[in-house]
Amino acid sequence: MSETILDVRDLQVEFPTPAGPARAVTGVSFSLRKGMRLGLVGESGSGKTTTVLAMMQMIKSPGRVAAGQVLLAGDDLLAMSAKQIRRARFSRIALVPQGAMNSLNPVLTVRAQIEDLLEAHGAQSEAIQRKRHVTDLLLRVGLAEAVADQFPHQLSGGMKQRVCIAIAIALSPQVIIADEPTSALDVIVQKQVMQTLIHAQRAVGAAIILVGHDMGLMAQFTHVVGVMYAGQLVEIAPVKDIFANPRHPYTRMLIASLPSFTSRRVFRGIPGVAPSIVNPPSGCTFHPRCPRAEARCMQEVPSEEVFGNEQRVRCHFAHEDHNVAFA
Amino acid sequence: MLHHVSKRVGMTLLVILLAITINFLIPRAMPGDPIEQQMNQLSSSSAGSVGDVQAMVQSYRERLGLDKPLWRQYLNYLWALVQLDLGYSLVNFPERVSDVILAGLPWTVALLGTATLISFGVGTILGGLLAWPGSSHWIRTLGVPLILLSAVPYFILGILLMFLFGLTYPLFPVAGAYPFGFTPSWNFESVRLLFYHAVLPASSIILASIGTWAIAMRGMVISVRGEDYIMLAEAKGLPPRRVFFAYGLRNAMLPQLTHLALTLSHIVSGAILVEVIFAYPGIGYRLYQAIQAKDYFVVQGIVLLLSISIAVAMLVMDLIYPLIDPRIGTEKKS
Amino acid sequence: MLRSIVTALVREPMLLAGILLLLSIGFFALLGPLFIDTSQAEVGSVAPRLRPSTQYLLGTDAQGRNVLAALVRATPQTLKIGLFAGVIGLGIGCLLGLLAGYFRGWADTIIRTIADVIMTIPGIAVLVLVATNVRSMTVMLMAVIVAGLSWMYPTRTIRAQTLSMRERPYIDIARLNGIGGLELVFMEIFPNLLPYIAASFVTAVSSAMLATIGLEALGLGPQNELTLGMMIFWAQSYGAILRGLWWWWSPPVAMMALIFIGLLMTSTGMDRMVNKRLRVES
């Protein structure tokens, strides 16, 4: 394939609480190659959004990045000064935010919101160039040129999402983070938006991190899937491997909870609730809800093991093969 | 859109009509006859040398149309108003009420207009800065005294300023819009003197109202700050100033303008009293003089003017609002 | 119940400070006459224009009043007007707001239209009109007049809150239980409105006092009774400020400033407390 463009090492994000620090993200490491699509899955509160926001230095005080490096083409984003990170945002690493409904400024036109990005980063100094670029971006995401002069409230949810995608690719960044880009949309529009996203990604040659909780969506659109639980990356593997042979019990349960067209069976959820990140369970954080858990899981934190084609898992029983019939 | 406009205009006309009617009815509903009172006062002060008081009262009544039935008077009143005839001053007869008003109006407009613009502008930006993380600390320390000041009515502040800068450290004149016996004209000296005389009254209004705007704006900006579009704006790497003004302030400004429209009558009332304290020859001061002299028609005329102008001002603001907030008046394209 | 009020107060220092300030002023107004001879507040009772001294702590004014005695007499009068007008305004406001917010329909439209229209007419305009035409103004009359103009804002606030509360689930349950109409309004909605009512009360009192003092400064106040506003009016007519009789005008000014600051702190504190509750609830 191609070279590594993003290298996240041992990322740790904390929020101080009266009861001690809440570890929202613990020891998360992964890397992205150019053109690759990584999916980050997990339930609400698993730390996926926090991880990607931390990468852009968007964690608001009193939360803070306690440790880790985010190397984008060799430059550590976390070590950058305020000015440097502002310059890097959207020009090197961009975000398609969760909830595009409210992410656009209601009093500015679409054009104004794309152009101020261009101006802030010193791209396209002439007005006519900017105008052309705006039109070009909108067409690329499948929107009409006329959308540029409209206000956000005049657009539908899918259109707003696509405007956000257009803004994200405006400066041809190296990495695009899409945070649950389709959660609030209906299935048909979901597919359209995802296809737009991939098309846009290909056009600028970026890598994508797709954050979500929909395993089915991940199966369709990503190359590598990472599963997050309670702030940790419990399994990460190429998409075929993770669906063919999920090694972490949580991953297995996530996949098993997907409804299937071929086999009729009882709808399976995952019992229990997400653990407290202030006072996490001892040993493996998943053990209270894990069907495979033994005494060892309560005492020892599982270390990371690598299997086959870059499948990394944090589980004492990761070596056990479980072939899941995924139809 | 047209429907919205016509609804607002209709409402304003209703308010104006109501104001006129109240203005007409209240004096006539109260016990006591102003003309008779005035005459009695005159005759007692000149030791009865005025002659047959009753005959005078009667002739004035006829002259001013007060002997006709009520509904007739009302229609006459409306008709006169349409012709912008507000009657005569009882005290300075035959001076017309409208002349009294016109003499005072420019002063009030200049004072009140400028003071409100300054305090709204500065107060709003100050309020925005108070709520924005990353603004300097000395702004926050400035905030507290200004907020305390806003609790006090304008004219009380006027009294304090008069004492401080008029008496103790005489820097500014404390009465009138220009020095006694001076005729203002269009030259530099005139403008300088006018400015000097306006400083204290204007400052009373400005200092006492800045706090109100700041607190209100601060509240709006705090809620705007939590919005998703602010997050995306920062993620885009936009310079903080741009985020503050174009994304934060502009959105918080919308309810702030509504607030301005609603508190207009309060502002005007405050300004009137400031004029009284400083003997500033605007509408407020003339109202005060008319009240003291029991010049009822002048009082009614000024009161009516106040009601109508505030109603019109609110209408104007209502109509301007869609121009600033693009969400009003434009529909979704499906 | 008392404990929860106390804990709420302690958590909101501004509210506590405001209430304490107002209470101290209240005590001064109530207990003052017991310690200070208010007969010296009559015109011509003492030698005029004397500076503050050990005999006359706040000096005397140009009309022969002991300023301290005058202050002791004037403060309760001003407070009376404010409280009275506030209570009436609030009472009407609550009633109309609840009715408009709960029953909606034409009752709402009528109430809302009247309130909006009257709000547009500057209060001082109407007050001046009425006050000029009254033969002799008294404290009570002032309170009534001012009350007539302070019901609009509470009505709006209460109406808005009632509208939103009406949609809450527990109201539906109450309705299903067969409770309806007025009983529902007073038994279910009203108790939850208490914080908003308290906040509106403070605002109503504040605006009533503002209107009162405005009228008095214009010379439309009660001529025969002494209020803080009237003290300022007399001082102003005499030119006390420019003649250096600072001990005449500064006590009533200071007292008024304290009252308004106290009211502002209380209402800000209440607003914050109410918002905190909202944030916890949602």
Image (tube, coloured by chain):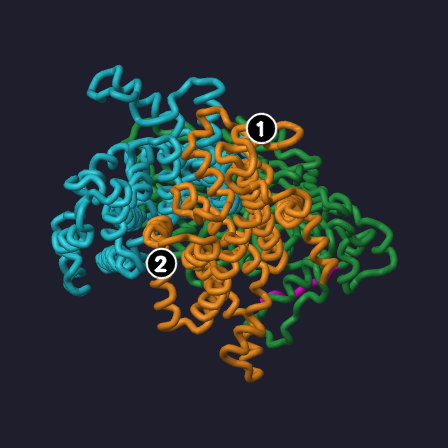
Chain colours: A green, B cyan, C orange
Q: In front here: A107 or B142?
A: B142
Which chain contains the residue that carries disc 1?
Answer: B
Q: Residue at x 65, y 45 (%)?
A: C32
- Looking at the image, residue B37 sits to the left or right of residue C72; the answer is left
Q: Which residue is identified by label 1? A: B137
Give x and y (percent) for residue A57: 59, 36
Q: In front here: B318 or C110?
A: C110
Chain part drawn in magenta: A321-327
Q: Is residue A41 visible?
A: no
Q: Label for residue C116?
A: 2
Q: Is residue C148 magenta?
A: no
What is the distance, in whole Å, between disc 2 and disc 1 at their CAs?
41 Å
Q: Residue at x 54, y 50 (%)?
A: C77
Farthest residue, direction top:
B189
Q: Residue at x 49, y 35 (%)?
A: C63
Farthest residue, direction bottom:
C178
Which amino acid type is shown beneath numbered disc 2? Asp
- Looking at the image, residue C28 sits to the left or right of residue C61; the answer is right
Which amino acid type is shown beneath numbered disc 1? His
In the displayed structure, C56 sits above or below B22; it is above
The N terminus of chain A lies in which quarter of the figure? Answer: top right
Q: Is residue B140 visible?
A: yes
Q: Main secondary structure of the magenta part?
A: loop
Q: Secondary structure at mark 2?
A: helix
Q: Residue at x 62, y 32 (%)?
A: C56
